[in-house]
Structures are given as structure tokens and as C-alpha cells.
Amino acid sequence: MKRTVSVFFAFVLIMCLCVPALADDTIKIGMIGPLTGPAASYGNSVKQGCEIAVEEINALGGIQLEISYQDDQHDAEISVNAYNNVMDWGAKMIVGTVTTNPCLAVSSIAYEERVFMMTPSASSLDAIANKDNMYQICFTDPAMGAHSAEYISEHKLAEKIAIIYNNADAYSTGIYQAFTEKANELGLNIVETKTFTDETTDFSVQITAAKEAGADLVFLPIYYTPASMIFNQAASMEYSPTYFGVDGMDGILQVEGFDTSLAEGVILLTPFSDASTEENVVNFVTKYVAAYGVIPDQFAADGYDAVYALYTAINEAGITPDTSYEDACESIISVITKIEVNGVTGTMTWSPDGTVTKDPKAVRIENGAYVEID
Amino acid sequence: MTLFLSYLINGISLGSVYAIIALGYTMVYGIAKMLNFAHGDIIMVGAYISFTATQYWGLHPLVSVVIAMMVCTVLGITIEGLAYRPLRKAPSLAVLITAIGMSYFLQNIALLIWGADLKNFSSVISIGSISILGGSILITGETIVTIAANIVIMIALTLFTGKTKMGKAMRAVSEDKGAAELMGINVNRTISVTFAIGSCLAAVAGVLLCSAYPALLPTTGSMPGIKAFTAAVFGGIGSIPGAMVGGILMGVIEILGKAYVSTELGDAFVFAVLIIMLLVKPSGLFGKSVREKV
């Protein structure tokens, strides 16, 4: 009996040794993000977006991709462990990390060790600052703020603007600062600015102030959780301005029990809209719904585009499974600013500082669904 | 002036929610002489139960409130029996830490059952807003009902502790557990009933809290719970009218602080007021005037 067991283990051991040898003709990519824990929905969306992209690319023939998905639970230390795991596994480059704080930790190590990283969704400027190996799929927070101001000015949406933002949150503050800067430059009239913090559930002061100032548009560079509370309370205070949100507002229609009529007419700038009629978006949405039974959100789209961006760069740089990760990093850096990727979040090009350039899409909520507007 | 008045009304509506939570805190403290830090989380459970009953089972909102009250009552008795009763003779610090542990336990259980994503609680109150001063000031239906509920509960609790046999037993236990036991009062049963009433009130508070502020998360009860505790201390912990006055003052101070000084410092004001109160009058506003701490 003992002998059988040891033979069995020896066999298993040999099989384990064989697996990497069999997979040698594929390029390995490590994906790091929160697959469990409080930010799990973001990480899982990115993962599922990546899976759709890998499936499509491998079906094309040519270069084959294999992704190892590592959970970081939105924790910087666990994320570093996850990074070490994928590098031991043989990853040549990283898709990730999904959330900002872990990204700051992992990207510093990856910068030292020369591993190329493409983050789908860590939108902070700090994630890419002074790291030539770091590139983003998502807009930076300041870009989102500036785009919002431009959009409001261009479409003459408001006479008087009020802003309510979370000044305990880097994302919200980053967008707010860039928005006011651009708004002043464009001559927009900001009549009231009110802040709140993570613990706030009572927004009556902020709403009363906006209402008293006579604002006809309220800019909300915040996540959908506080936004839903603002919509509820403003309605009970009989205040109904135009609301203008950014990508953090994405998800408001999925809040369980939320009366979507309160969000009627809300405009938001988001890089991805599942309502788009573009061929690649329709294709992505159809496949995603078939595979996972839900409509893809912006994180899924970011994950999908991240894989395609790396795939385009791999082809352009002529990377093979034998290329070391250091060489892969240098050669991708040299081509990434030259390529153009037509993704589901728009047509993307990159600057050497790691930021992406693409057109934001504006959607308006009508009858509880996104409708694309100019 | 109208602006000030509308801030004042906002403050009173926020305060009335604190008051109703503070009533439960003060009730349990007054009799069991322990700070039940899990009170805020029982509120959260009550709100989730009501949400589940209306959204998933399609029940009438008022029926859901009754179910929430029953579930919370059972929950309160269970928590008391399992977590606090074995520590009856232990130092009060041990009980306090157990209560904090219980608070996290309830939050994590809620996380497990209902998940981390936001639920939007739809108000159980169907009466609309009243506008006064020519429509410039609105008082929401939630505020009216919450204040009415406060008054009803306050009177009912005062009558209960003053007139009924069980109420008298509670006051006896509150004054001296040992002597009460010698007089033939079943201390454990009395404290159980206290927790039952406190938790039943928590369910009402949870439903009213979430009707006014509809964001429902596993952490929904913690911050209002702490603020209501502050309100109870402010009003004189153990005093029933003190809890209500303290709660309303707390809400008004918070809103006026946010409106006229700084929105970020709103919470800081609340706690600054607590510190000043403790320095000037450690027993709280009504701490001395009500001799039986009930």
C-alpha cells in the first residue's frame, strides 16, 4: 500500500514537471486583482473580460496566451505575494493590478525588476508616476475631470454648477481638482462646492446648499453608493437638477432596491457603454453575456482591452515564449507609444508617461438604461 | 432665515433618528449597566430583515416591520443569553470587549448573508412631505413619523418602568442586583426582557433610519450607533427623556456645524460636544434629575 502511494506521488511529481514543458509555446501573462474580499466584483469582472479576450486570441492561431489569475483581496501585501507567485510561474508581463493601493506596491517592485505592467483600472496618477514600465487602460482621474468640464461647456449643459465630492477619497478629489481647473479655464460658473467623507449618510446640508445657490447642474465625481443616497435625499427635498457623473457612477442601476426613476436623466462620462452599437462592443457584450450571464461592466471591458493591448504590443515587438521578462519589458516600452488599439473602451494610444488617450463616451440614463449620446 | 430654518429642520430629522437609537442604548445601560455596542448592528439586522421581507418575499412594509421586530427581539435575547450572561460576574471591561466582538460578528454575518454590495432601502412610510412657510421649508414624512415614534416610545417606556411589575423589577435590578435577587426577583429573566425590549426598539430604529437614509450596508448601523451612544451620554445615560433630547440636540449640532463651519468636521463637532459635556457635567443633561437610572 505504502509503495502504491509513493509510486502515485512520484507519478504526480513527474506530471507536474511535464506541464510547463507542454505549455512552452505560449506566452504567459500574470493577472493580479481582488477575486475575493470587498472589491471582488472589480477583480472578477477584469478576470472575465481577460478570459473572453484570451479565448478569441487563441482561436486566431499564431501567438497563444495563457493567463494565471492571482487574488490580492485588494490588499497591498497580498498583492506583492501574488506578484511573486505569477513571476515564479513564468509570467512575462502583468495585467494589473486592478485597484490602486495594491498597484502602488506592486508597480514599484515591478519597476525595479523590469516587468511590464498594464493596469486595466488603477486610475490614480501615482500608479504610473515615474515608472516607465507602467501603462493604463483607464483614464487618469485628472483626465476624467477635464473631460467632464469640456463636455459640460461644449454642450452648454449648465448655467450654474454645484459640485459635491468626497474629500476623503483620492479618486474623487483628483477628478474634482482637474474639473475646477478646467472649468475656470472654460469660464464655467461654479456656484457651490461641498464635500463629504466616507462615513457620510446625511447629505441634507450639501443638497440644501446646492439648491439655495440655484445650481441647475450638480457634478458628482463620486462612486455610485453615495450618489444613490444623494438622489434619494434630493428627491425628498424636491430638488431635481441635472446630475453629471463619471465612471464611478457606473453601477448605480444595479443597486438592489434602488428606484431607477430617481436616476432618470443622469449623464455620465464612462469609457465603456454596453449600449454602444460598435461592432466590436456588440461582439464582446454578446460573448460575455453568453459566458457569464451578466452584462459586462467597465472593469470587464478594461480587462478585455488590456489583453488586446498586450497582444498588439507582443506582435509589434516580436516577443516569443523564449524572450525573458526583462527583454519583453524593454521591447514593449519601445513599441507601446507607437501602436493604436481599437478596443471596446475606444481607440487607444499611449503617451510615454503611461497615460492613455481615447475619447470618453457620454451616456444618459433613460427608462432605467444607458442611452449613448454625443 | 429660511435657510437657517431648513438646516434646523434637517438637524431635527437627523436628530430624531439618533434619539430613537439612543433610547435603546439608554434602556439597556440603565438596567443591565452595560454598554451594548452591538446595538447599532442589531439596528442594521432589523433593516435588512425588513428589506428582505419587502423586496424578496413581497410583503407589505408594515408587516415587514413587525417581522423585523420579532427577529430582533429573538436575536437580542439570544445574544444576551449566549454572550453576556456567562460574563455577569466578570469585570465590566470583559463585557465591553465581548459587546464589541459581537458587533463585528453581526456585521460579518450580515456580510455573509446579504453580501457587501449596497442595498437601497425603500421607505416604509407612505405619508408625504409637509411644506411650511409658503413651500420654502419641507418636513419629510419620515421625520414626522420618527418624532412621533420617539414620543410614543418615550412615554411607553416611562410608563412601563414606572407602573408595571416587570418595570419595577427592572428598576430594582438597576439599583442593586444582589439585593434584587434576595427580594426574589429573577435577575437573569429581567435582564433578558430588557434586551428583548431594547432589541425590539432597535428594529424600529433600523427601519426608520433606513427610511430616512436608504443606503443599507453591513456597516450601516455602526456610525449612527456610535453617534446615538454619544447622544445618550450627552442626555445622561440611563435617562429616557435625556436620550431623546440628547439625540435631537446632537443632530441639530451636527447639521449646523456642517452647514456653517465645515462639512468635513460635522462628525468632529458631535464628539467635541461630548467631550465638553463630560468635562462640564459628567452625568449628562438629565443625568442627575432622574434618580432611578431607567
Image (cartoon, coloured by chain):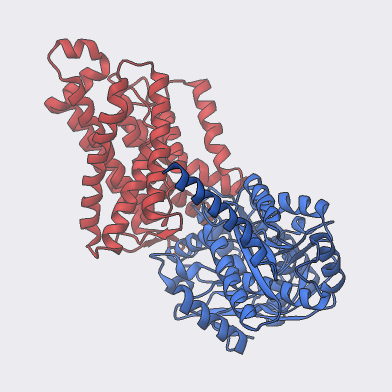
The residue shown at (51%, 49%) is A7
x 36%, y 37%: residue: B39
Hue used for the chain lettered B: red
Q: Quadrant of the N terminus of chain A?
A: top left
Seen in the picture, residue B161 relative to A62 is either above or below; the reply is above
Residue nearest the viewer, comparing A258 with B102: B102
Q: Is residue A177 above or below residue A167?
A: below
Q: Is residue B123 visible?
A: yes
Position of residue A247 measured from the top left corner of the image (x, y, whole percent): 61, 68
State the image quarter where residue B107 is shown.
top left
Q: Quadrant of the C terminus of chain A?
A: bottom right
Q: Which chain comes out blue in the rendered image?
A: A
Q: Which one is in front, A191 or B171?
A: B171
- Compared to residue B278, the image places residue A100 above or below, namely below
Position of A230 with respect to A279 (left or right) is: left
Can you tell which quarter of the image residue A97 is in? bottom right
Residue at screen point 74% across, 57% down: A127
